[in-house]
Amino acid sequence: MNSVKAFAPATVANVSCGFDILGFAIDAMGDYVEVTRKEKPGLRVVSIEEDGGKLPWEVEKNTCAVAIQAMLDDYGKQVGMDIALKKGLPLGSGMGSSAASAVAALIAANRLLGDPYERKNLLPFAIAAEKAACGAGHADNVAPSLLGGFVLIRDYHPLDVIKLHVPEGLYCTLLHPHFELKTSDSRSVLRDMISLKHSTIQSGNVAGFVAGLYQEDFELISRSMRDVIAEPYRAVLIPGFYEVREALKSAGALGMGISGSGPTLFALSRGAEKSADIAKAAEDIYESIGLGVDTYFSEINTIGAYVLEEKN
C-alpha cells in the first residue's frame, strides 16, 4: 500500500461518575487522517483542514505526528510518511478532538506498515500524543476512540484498560453550546482533596454504572450518573447547566453530564427516538437563554477507529 485513510470517532470522557477513568465513543462525528508513504525517512504534516488555522504543523507538536513518531520509535525503523488531517470535531469542545486525530493517524500508519501492532498495543502511542497536546497523558478519550464502546482505565502503572459491555439501544446526545471553555479553567476549579463521604458516593456510582451496563439495567445506569467530585465545581462555568439538565430529564434522558472538561454536555437515553427528543429539548432551552447550540445524537460506537480507504 502507498496510502491509507482512517477515521476515529468522537468520545465522551468521565461519563459523570467516572472522572478520568471512564469514556465511550460515539458514531455521530470524528476526525479523518490520511497517511502516505514517502521515500525519504521522517514525518511531514502536509495538510490540515477544518481547523480554522489553529493546529500546529510542526511534527513535534502535531498530535498525529507525535503519535506516529512514538510508534516508529518503538517499531525501530524510521519510515517516511506524509500526514493529511481533516478535522470533523471542533477544537476544545470536550469531544476528544486531539484524541481522535492521534488515533486516526495511528490506525492509518499501522495499516501502512502491515499492521505490526495489535489495536490495544497502539494505546501508549496515543497517550503520548495526548500528553503533547494538553500536558497530561490521560487515556479516557484515546482508549474509547481506539477500541470503541465504554472503556474503564483501571490503572496507568502499568496501563490496565478494560472494554466494557454496551447495552443494546443505548444512545448518546451531545450538546455543544456556542462558547469557549478552556481546559485549564475547568481543571483549575477542581479540589486537590475530596472527603471520605464523597469518595464513597463516587465509588458506589462507578460500580453501579458498570453493573448497569452489564445487566442492561437502564434505571441503574440512570441512578449511577451522579458526579460529586468534578461536576459541582465545573457546572458553574457552563451557562444554563442546571436548566438544561432539568429539561433533558423531562425529555427522557437517563442522565446528563459534562463531556470531558466541557463545554459540551452529553445525555444518555434508551432508543433513537428518545435521543432526538432530548436534542430538541436542548435546542429549545438554549434558545430561551439566548445561547446557540449544536446537537448530535447517535448510538454508541462499539468498534472504535477504522480504515476507510487503502490505495496502492
Image (spheres, rainbow, N blue to C red):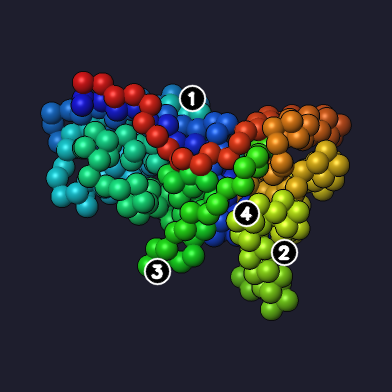
| Disc 1 residue crowd, few under 14, some 14–19, many 20+, Cα 10 Å | some
Residue at the limit of the structure toward the bottom, as seen here: 196
Which circle's residue, 3 or 1, is located before the other in the chain? 1
Q: Secondary structure at mark 1?
A: loop
Which circle's residue, 4 or 2, is located before the other in the chain? 4
Please name the residue that numbered disc 1 is placed on: 50
Please name the residue that numbered disc 3 is placed on: 157
Q: Amino acid at mark 2?
A: Val
Please name the residue that numbered disc 4 is placed on: 213
Q: Position of residue 1 (x, y in %)?
A: 20, 26
- Quadrant where the C terminus is found in the figure: top left
312 or 284, nearer to the observer: 312
Which circle's residue, 1 or 2, is located before the other in the chain? 1
For discs 4 and 3, the disc positioned in front in the rendered view:
4
Please name the residue that numbered disc 2 is placed on: 228
Q: Secondary structure at mark 4?
A: helix
Q: Amino acid at mark 3?
A: His
Q: Is residue 207 above or below residue 106?
A: below
Q: Position of residue 86 (x, y in %)?
A: 43, 26
The disc placed on residue 10 is: none
Whether residue 217 is visible = yes
Which circle's residue, 2 or 3, is located before the other in the chain? 3
Q: CA distance from mark 4 to mark 2?
A: 20 Å
